Image (spheres, coloured by chain):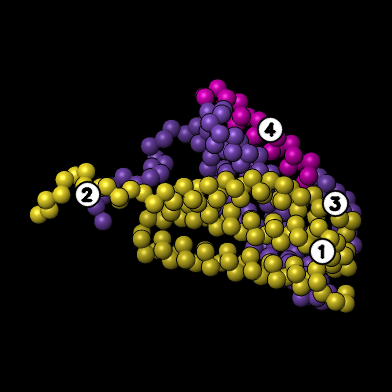
Chain colours: A purple, B yellow
Amino acid sequence: MPERPLSPHLSVYKFKYTLATSILNRFAGLGLSLGFLLLVYWLVALAGGARAYAQARALLTLGIFKLVYVLLLAAFVYHLVAGVRHLIWDTGRGLERASVRRSAWVVATVSVVVTVIVAYWMLRPGAYAR
Amino acid sequence: MSLRGPLGRVLGRGSAKQGVHEWWLQRLTSIALVPLAVGFAVSLLTLPALDYATLVGWMRHGGTALGLVLFVLVAARHSQLGVRVVIEDYVHASGLKTLALVATNFAHVLAAAAAVFAILKVALGGHL
């Protein structure tokens, strides 16, 4: 294959937070694609009946999964908020340098705040104990 | 050697006007997922418990199964389109790229079908 420049040529860009918000959105999306498989596993176990679900639940309530759920939650919230930003960009609005900078901060702040609140709700003492 | 001029060669050979189809579908699924994904998350996280009986009752409730089926189908398509773009951007070896695209497409269809089947089985199932 002839040596041609291939897109995206990541190495030629100076690192900026606009680049960070963009690549983070991809990583979040990929993480959610993996999380989707977890959702499918959970649904299939549920369809398998009470015993199959009890087995799956024993696995899915292992301590390590708390971390998985918080990461999935963060990816979900970030991908949602950043995705709405992308949809707004698609209408041609908010593409000036100043507003891109501002919306990057809005996305970061809203994501962190919502993630922390929902994570607290999810992991509150005694949650989903039964 | 052809006697046709440059204009004659390109006439009628324009794009099929389908180049933006998947770009547009990614936006459509995004918009649909805002209420579907938020609705799913809120509905699930506000359940009092996550035991078998609670979840079966939840899934047999009118809108839940419909909302879940819609969410799972749209999310699977959205995910497939997204994963596809990532593969096309970063996997450059053409054989590997094709293999990855075929494998992830199959995986998404399988995941969506399994999820829909599972939801319907619980929602329409007889005894608890």
**In front of the other: A122 or A49:** A49
Q: Residue, x 69% and y 67% (percent of image)?
A: B116
Residue type beneath disc 4: Thr
Q: Is the magenta stretch mostly helix, strand or loop?
A: helix
Q: Mark 2 points at which residue?
A: B9
Q: Name the residue under label 4.
A: A109
Marks 1 and 4: CB-CB under 8 Å? no
What chain does badge 2 belong to?
B
Q: Residue at x 76, y 60 (%)?
A: B66
Q: Mark 4 lies on which chain?
A: A
Give SS at disc 4: helix
> Above or below — where is A49 with respect to A20?
below
Instruction: Decide if residue B54 is on the left or right side of residue A36.
Output: right
A109 falls in the magenta region: yes
Residue A35 figure quarter: bottom right
* Residue B120, picture quadrant: bottom right
Chain at numbered mark 3: B
> Comparing marks 1 and 4, which lies closer to the viewer?
1
Front position in the image: B71 or A2: B71
| Pointers 2 and 3 in contact (C-beta within 8 Å) | no
Point out the stretch of residues depicted in magenta. A96-119
Which residue occupies 61% across, 41% down? Answer: A83
Q: From mark 3 to mark 4, how far is it between C-alphas?
A: 24 Å
Q: What residue type is labelled 3?
A: Thr
Give the label, 3 or 4, closer to the camera: 3
Q: Mark 3 points at which residue?
A: B46
Compared across the picture, whether B98 is left or right of B78 comes to left
Label 1 sits on residue: B59
Q: Residue B112 location in percent, x, y?
A: 63, 65
